[in-house]
């Protein structure tokens, strides 16, 4: 399943898996049913800099305008999670609350 799950699917109808040496170390390769296509550096083969650079805020002025639009101080650390809500368990949520408590100048 390329980016969603780095383990073997065990499915007989999937022939290959794109991965790298970190995601699938040598010691675990025997457990994969797929033939492994090892990328030389990283299996995550896209980059916002190359595929969506027009969406990135380039200047401090652009960044400050975006923060102002959403009511965020321009010098605050902004916490954000783009995961599906069902992936956020109580332990993770408590950890986030602790982090929010420890960081003074913050936004969510």
Image: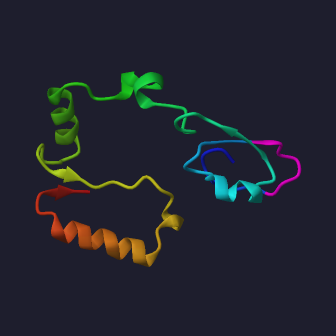
Name the side, left or right, on which 23 lies relative to 13: left
Residue shown at 14% from the left, 50% from the top: 76
- Residue 98 at x, y percent in the picture: 25, 73
Q: Which residue is nearer to you in this view: 103 or 21? A: 21
- Residue 35 at x, y percent in the picture: 78, 43
Q: Which residue is nearer to you in this view: 24 or 96? A: 24
Residue shown at 68% from the left, 58% from the top: 28
Residue shown at 52% from the left, 65% from the top: 87
Name the side, left or right, on which 39 lies relative to 98: right
Residue shown at 33% from the left, 29% from the top: 56
31 magenta-colored: no
Q: Which residues are magenta?
A: 10-16
User: Would you say the magenta stretch is mainly helix, strand or loop?
Assistant: loop
- Residue 33 at x, y percent in the picture: 81, 53
Q: Is residue 2 above or below residue 55?
A: below
> In which quadrant will I find the C terminus?
bottom left
Name the side, left or right, on which 38 lies relative to 47: right
Where, by quadrant of the figure, is residue 53 drawn? top left
Q: Which residue is nearer to you in this view: 16 or 99? A: 16
- Residue 52 at x, y percent in the picture: 44, 25
- Going by the picture, which residue comes out furthest to the front? 27
Q: Is residue 33 above or below residue 88?
A: above
Where, by quadrant of the figure, is residue 67 drawn? top left
């Amino acid at each position: 399943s390329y980016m969603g799950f780095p383990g073997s699917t065990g499915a007989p109808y999937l022939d290959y898996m794109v991965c790298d040496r970190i995601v699938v170390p040598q010691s675990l390769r025997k457990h994969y049913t797929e033939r492994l296509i090892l990328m030389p550096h990283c299996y995550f083969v896209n980059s916002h800099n190359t595929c969506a650079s027009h969406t990135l805020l380039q200047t401090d002025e652009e960044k400050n305008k975006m923060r102002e639009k959403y009511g965020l101080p321009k010098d605050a650390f902004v916490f954000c999670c783009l995961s599906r809500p069902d992936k956020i368990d109580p332990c993770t949520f408590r950890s986030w609350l602790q982090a929010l408590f420890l960081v003074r100048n913050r936004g969510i």
